[in-house]
Amino acid sequence: TKWIVSVSDNGIDLSTFEADFIQFQDPTIHSVSPKFGFSSASNIITLIGDSVHSSDSVKCLFRDVNSDENVVVNGIIFNETALNCEVGENDFTSTVYLISYSLNAGVDWCETALSFVTLSSPLIESLSHEHGIVNNELSAMVLGKNLAVGGSLSFCQLIDQDGVEAMKRSATPLDDGSGIACKITCPSATTLYHVIVSVENGVTPVSSSQHPFWCIPEPAIHYAYPKFIAVGESTPIVVYGNFHPGIIFECRFEGRIPSVTPARHMIDSSSLECISPAYSSPQSISLEIIGLVETVLLNVIDPVRVEATIPAVIFSGSDSIIIKGNNFIPGGMICSVQGKETVLEVINGTHAVCKSVAEAKPSSVALDIFFKDARQISDVTNITLYPTPLIETVSPTSGLVYGGTTLVVKGRNFRKLGRSFCAFGDIVVEANIHSSIHLSCVTPEIAAGNVPVKFSLDNGMTMIGNQSFSFVQPIVLHSVSPKTAVNGTDLFLTGKGFRRNVTIKCSFGNGHGDFSLAKVVSSTRASCPVVARTFGYIGLSVVTSDNMRISGAKAAEIYNHPLVAVTANKTLFGSDAGGQEIELLISSEADELLEHSAIGCLFGHRSVPATVTRSVVKCMTPPWEPQTPRNVTLTVNLNGMEFSKNVLNFEYIEAPRVTKIHP
């Protein structure tokens, strides 16, 4: 009812001011939803009843039944049958609250017979399973507090380490109220997840604390190490595979005497350690991880022994050495020198080849032989690695087939480690070691041709070097022409024994190192240019490419003439028709000028013969060539080579003609 209100202070007179007053029927609240909530979450609590009229001043009061402390929160009219109370996060403690409400900002409170229960957050205390197999479903019990509340729904969830949900399933409360039962299916990824329980009271879902849960592959054996067990030794065997730390495994060794031992988990989930019993004799055994299908085959073998190395003297950088011993087994054996490991190439049970010395440095080192799959089965011997001899130069590289040529070998790390020799093909001659960088030997008599040369410092166990030596037949010179020449003149040699497949040179003088390359024309003819630093009569011999004489110390002789200076007593000119004799004076450092030499005068590019008497050269002028300059150069040549060291000028003039006489 709506009333109009006036005021009187005497009961007779009424105030002129009037106000409205609304009188409502008392609301009736008969239920609350939800009936519980969690103290750590905000809650919307709905009071449901009749005659809930509109008001802007709604308040809700919650009285703690244990402490009589009140919590007052704002409310809002939802409709004529409901109002909502808005409880913030952490406004409540875990207890039971009696509910009252007010529609006029708390002036008048309407008490109800309703209550609201506040619970602490859901808490997981333990899981019946700490891990699951990928892609497999697992029934697990989740134990803890407030995981299932009457009238609520609980869900089990898997979340990854980034908080991403991987699985969500509804849960079933346990009869004793201690937790819930969940069905968990691991995704395909092998990783660590977390289990949480989500409890929904119909208004605000609340999640529990997290509990770690591993999704792991199906337990399996991949391989084991070592694969070999030494007779008489108890050996730790590491089995690699999928073994989660939460699972207890046992090892069973099946041999002549079966044995079961507990397995010890290694650092991670990928390996187990099983301790083998000590076996008294070689045999094959199998290792089984109880509960798994796979088995590993192991072999019990006798220990490895190293007796000697071949060769006994070993050079660093050697391609390989042969090891003599026993119990070598093909496949899976390793040799190690200075940390360099290579596969041991087993020849038979007593001999094997090791290539680990190729990169080892000179020193006294340990040679270790062991099994790749059983490093504990090994033997060690000490060896000395000597610096590897190195051949740098061998000279000469050719000599006569009669032998007797001293071969000088320069290099490094020469030392006498036994008999030293030089091997020319299959012929061996003794070598003399003069120092660590110098040895020598004398060539044997051998057939003509290129012969490989190798060297040994250790009785032939190790051969070094990869040189060759050219054995050649001697060459006999019959004649040389011309006999007089200047540097650069081609000499023509006749004789016998010239060979196109053998490089030869002409040697001028007596050991001055004046050489020129010869061109072999046939077995009887060759040519070479004059290259000499001395003048006069000089010896000429034929040598090999590295200057070994093969035609005698002085097989022939030539006269090496120096260049001459050319002068004239008068101006040099002549008629266009040519045919005039001119005289030139020549001088040089030579003791004499050979008058029988082939000397010519060169007018420009045209050469004419000349005669020489002592220091006077005479020659006839050639005709002038029309369309060419009348001034030309004039020089002297010897055997077609430039002979004068200076140049004169000659002028062609038109011959005088008489055309008229007067008077």
Image: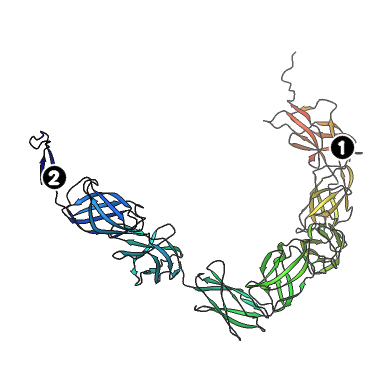
Q: Is residue 605 left or right of residue 398?
A: left
Distance from the alpha carbon under mark 1 to that under mark 2: 163 Å
**Residue 598 is at least partly visible in this image:** yes
Residue type for callout 1: Val
Q: Nearer the viewer, residue 344 or 252?
A: 252
Give the quarter of the figure containing the C terminus.
top right
User: Circle 2 sits on which residue?
Assistant: 22
1 or 2: mark nearer the eye: 2
Any mark on residue 369, and which? Answer: none
Q: Nearer the viewer, residue 103 or 466?
A: 103
Q: Is residue 172 above or below residue 253?
A: above
Colour basis:
rainbow
**Residue 578 is at least partly visible in this image:** no
The residue carrying pointer 2 sits among few (fewer than 14), some (14 to 19) or many (20 or more) residues within 10 Å by Cα, namely: few
View extreme (left): residue: 12
Any mark on residue 612, and which? Answer: 1
Q: Is residue 582 left or right of residue 257?
A: right
Q: Nearer the viewer, residue 557 or 399?
A: 399
- The residue shown at (70%, 29%) is 629
Sequence-wise, the earlier of marks 1 and 2 is 2
View extreme (right): residue: 591
Q: Secondary structure at mark 1?
A: strand
Q: Nearer the viewer, residue 157 or 233?
A: 157
**Corner quadrant of residue 500:** bottom right
View extreme (bottom): residue: 256
Residue type for callout 2: Ile
Q: Secondary structure at mark 2?
A: strand
